[in-house]
């Protein structure tokens, strides 16, 4: 099987690429990335807390290991349509795992310029891939797998289904309540996928990915060159990373307002394993949507889990509530279905408390 994986230098892309490379199956894997995530994090004055090696060094180390799979990495910007098309034409993939995007809501919300950039980067990249397949008459043969986000659902007061709402026997795609300029790029992607399926019969697997936590997977632990990134800055560090970073550095955890609103979360290993499993799903000419989350947890509860784990390690953590600068329902109880996703994962997902323990353990060993 031949697989193109975009965004393979990223937080989710790298461990996914790595797991595929270590697969016992006869896979040929081509990783693509323009290395922009590293640049964006530096641009906002930060860096990954874990020491991550360059793609050149990572691939060099990987090539020294005897593996069943064939793999390669190419630095390429998905906005370069002609190069993208030529690459697909030459490589002839059976599946495209599209994980490349500008993934930060605060970064996209920073200014008009960042919002336009995010929109262009994310949506034109997706269109370039979809249209390249169409122009090469490959649209019915290639599985297109992508990670959008649970953020496209907003925070409605009903149990969120996996992708569609049924009204009078009509299945309506549900994906347009994103609350940031980044989330709207993902809502747009969902619309593109739905259209590519309706117009061209393309098989799409759209994973609505939840807030992902964890620094490592089985494969990233195999060698220091394979370490994954951990960001904790305002722009690229998700809320749980910022809490964990503060607690390790003996700073208080700051919760905006009551913090009783629940959000969906998932362990990085569950994301990676389910994406790798999805490569075995059939070409069914459908738009398939999965809610890729394991638990909904309130922000307050999240901070209490971090406090509990810190206490077990003899560290006392202070949790402070501060005035909420955001407009949000601080008590929203999110409910979401994930039956389809659990079938793809094929095992029980990790508990969020375990994901917190793993992350804090990984970072602690980094300091010692
Ligand atoms: N991490 C999460 O919590 C989370 C949650 C929901 C959805 N997602 C989605 O999952 C995907 C992966 O997220 P991530 O956290 O690994 O982000 P990431 O920023 O770590 O990875 C994305 C990768 O794509 C690359 N990239 C961006 N634009 C590109 C372009 N034009 N051409 C080539 N490469 C490009 C970046 O350099 C980066 O390495 C994204 O689509 C993101 O929106 C992530």
Image (tube, grey):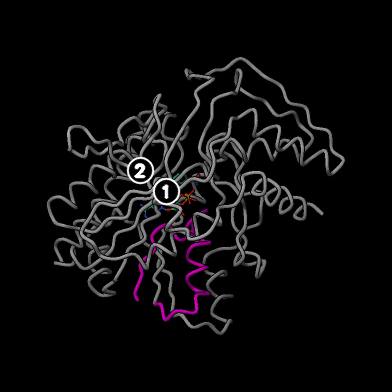
Circle number at residue 339: 1
- Residue 139, given in percent of the width and then of the height, sits at 18, 63
Q: Badge 1, how many Cα within 10 Å: few under 14, some, many 20+? A: few
Q: Badge 2, how many Cα within 10 Å: few under 14, some, many 20+? A: many
- Residue 18, given in percent of the width and then of the height, sits at 52, 68
Q: Provide the secondary structure element on which disc 2 rests.
A: loop
Question: Is 97 above or below relative to 156?
Answer: below
State the residue at coordinates (44%, 43%). Answer: 103
State the residue at coordinates (39%, 70%). Answer: 30
**Outermost residue, front direction?**
168
Question: Is 269 above or below relative to 179?
Answer: below
Circle number at residue 162: 2
Question: Is 18 above or below relative to 198?
Answer: below
Left or right of 258? Residue 92 is left
- Residue 57, given in percent of the width and then of the height, sits at 57, 70
Label 1–label 2 contact, CB within 8 A:
yes
152 or 182: which is nearer to us? 152
Q: Identify the mark nearer the N-term, 1 or 2.
A: 2
Q: Was residue 10 drawn as part of the magenta stretch in this picture?
A: yes
Question: Is 316 above or below relative to 56?
Answer: above
State the residue at coordinates (62%, 61%). Answer: 227
Q: Provide the secondary structure element on which disc 1 rests.
A: helix
Magenta stretch, residue numbers: 1-27
Q: CA distance from mark 1 to mark 2?
A: 8 Å
Left or right of 258? Residue 122 is left
184 or 314: which is nearer to us? 314
**Outermost residue, right direction?**
314
């Amino acid at each position: 099987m031949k697989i193109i994986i975009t965004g393979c230098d990223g937080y989710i892309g790298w461990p996914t690429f790595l797991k595929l490379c270590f697969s016992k199956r006869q896979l040929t894997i081509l990783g693509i990335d323009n290395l922009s995530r590293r640049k964006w994090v530096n641009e906002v004055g930060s860096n990954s807390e874990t020491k991550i090696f360059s793609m050149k060094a990572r691939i060099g180390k990987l090539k020294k290991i005897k593996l069943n799979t064939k793999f390669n990495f190419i630095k390429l910007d998905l906005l370069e349509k002609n190069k993208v098309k030529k690459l697909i034409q030459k490589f002839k993939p059976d599946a495209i795992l599209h994980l490349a995007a500008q993934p930060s809501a605060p970064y996209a919300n920073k200014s008009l310029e960042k919002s336009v950039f995010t929109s262009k980067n994310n949506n034109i990249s997706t269109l370039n891939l979809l249209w390249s397949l169409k122009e090469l008459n490959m649209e019915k043969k290639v599985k297109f797998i992508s990670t959008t986000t649970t953020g496209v659902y907003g925070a409605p007061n009903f149990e969120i289904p996996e992708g569609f709402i049924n009204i009078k026997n009509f299945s309506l795609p549900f994906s347009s309540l994103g609350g940031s300029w980044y989330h709207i790029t993902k809502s747009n992607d969902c619309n593109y996928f739905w259209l590519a399926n309706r117009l061209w019969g393309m098989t799409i697997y759209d994973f609505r990915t939840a807030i992902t936590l964890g620094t490592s997977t089985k494969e990233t632990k195999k060698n220091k060159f394979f370490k994954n990134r951990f960001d904790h800055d305002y722009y690229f560090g998700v809320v749980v990373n910022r809490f964990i970073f503060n607690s390790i550095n003996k700073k208080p955890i700051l919760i905006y307002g009551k913090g009783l609103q629940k959000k969906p979360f998932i362990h990085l290993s569950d994301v990676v394993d389910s994406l790798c499993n999805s490569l075995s799903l059939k070409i069914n000419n459908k738009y398939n949507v999965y809610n890729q989350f394991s638990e909904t947890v309130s922000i307050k509860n999240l901070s209490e889990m971090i406090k509990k784990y810190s206490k077990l390690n003899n560290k006392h953590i202070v949790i402070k509530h501060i005035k909420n600068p955001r407009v949000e329902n601080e008590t929203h109880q999110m409910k979401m279905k994930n039956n389809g996703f659990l079938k793809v994962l094929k095992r029980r997902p990790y508990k969020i408390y375990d994901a917190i323990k793993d992350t804090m353990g990984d970072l602690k060993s980094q300091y010692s």
